[in-house]
Image (cartoon, rainbow, N blue to C red):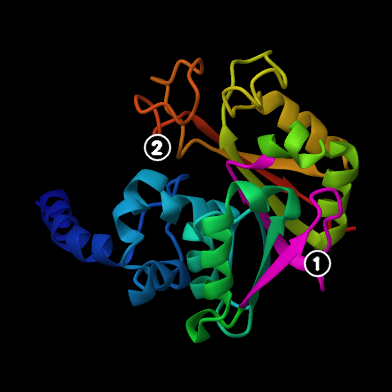
Amino acid sequence: MRPTVLALLLTLALPSVALCKVPEAHGGAVSAAVKKALDDPARQADKADDARRKVAQVMAFAEVKPGQKVLELVPGSGYWTRVFSAIVGPQGHVYTVWPKEMEKYSAESYAEWQKLVATPHYANVSLLPQAAAALSVPEPVDVVFTAQNYHDYHDSFMGPVDMGKFDRQVYDALKPGGLFVVIDHAAPAGSGLADTDTLHRIDPAVVKQEVEAAGFVFDGESGALRNPADAHDRKVFDKSIRGHTDQFIYRFRKPAK
């Protein structure tokens, strides 16, 4: 009888636990700060994309916490920025880098971004327009984050950028023990940089090799955005795959000493 009673009690307790925990990519629980950020009323327009983007899992994997400083490279529509802003709170800050080389390709988004950083609700967000090859930040940060844009830095319209120097600039921007989180569209294994400008994809092995060469230690991978149904042979903007590409999420750590 005792095992039966115990099982019944556990069954009754599970619904209340599920209400207060959001599952993370590795089986743990997303922090209260992340859950509060996802419920921010200012994010109402973004919430429809939360499940597809696996935002809770990504934020848990990136280990973002209240009071931290975050540097986001090429923020695009600001989806991730709005989450970062809510998580780090008034004691933290989010620096967003817009490479000047990209402004002419995203003039509308850039104009909207200038409005966002002028909004009181996002007083902890700053805009840093700068050359792609000259990354800098006013103070050391805890996390550097880029989603679907690492591959762009290899292309001619961005310079192209010397990625050895660039990744070292990222390294120098971080506090000891800080994290560099890279999300990008996966290209076929062994393809190297062949698809960065055509399909807007990159071989994950290249990213790992380049970032580690700058002194980072590979600290883990999340499979939250993996899609084995993606054949890696179509442009990421193709309607048949857009929004559902196979994406890798790598986390690199700057050694604490």
Read off the magenta span. Answer: 125-150
Residue depicted at 34% across the width and 51% down the height: 49
Q: Is residue 87 magenta?
A: no
Q: Where, by quadrant of the figure, is residue 95 drawn?
A: bottom right
Q: Amino acid at mark 2?
A: Gly
Spatial CA span between label 1 and label 2: 30 Å
Secondary structure under tag 1 reads loop
Q: Residue at x 52, y 33 (%)?
A: 247
Q: Where does the image place residue 235, in percent across and percent down from the top left? A: 50, 24
Q: Is residue 125 among the parts visible in the rendering?
A: yes
Q: Who's the residue at 33% across and 75% down the image?
A: 41
Please name the residue that numbered disc 2 is placed on: 243
Compare residues 75 and 54 and report the one nearer the observer. Answer: 75
Residue 171: mark in rendering: none
Q: Residue at x 55, y 54 (%)?
A: 76
Q: Does residue 28 appear in the picture of this structure?
A: no
Q: Is residue 204 above or below residue 101?
A: above
Q: Residue 137's mark?
A: 1
Find residue 176 and report its image quarter: bottom right
Image side of residue 95 versus residue 24, left or right: right
Q: Quadrant of the C terminus?
A: bottom right
Up-down relation of residue 233 to residue 98 (above or below): above
Q: Any magenta on residue 145?
A: yes
Could you say where residue 165 lies in the image, as x and y percent from the top left? 90, 43
Q: Tell me residue 25's x, y (percent).
A: 45, 45
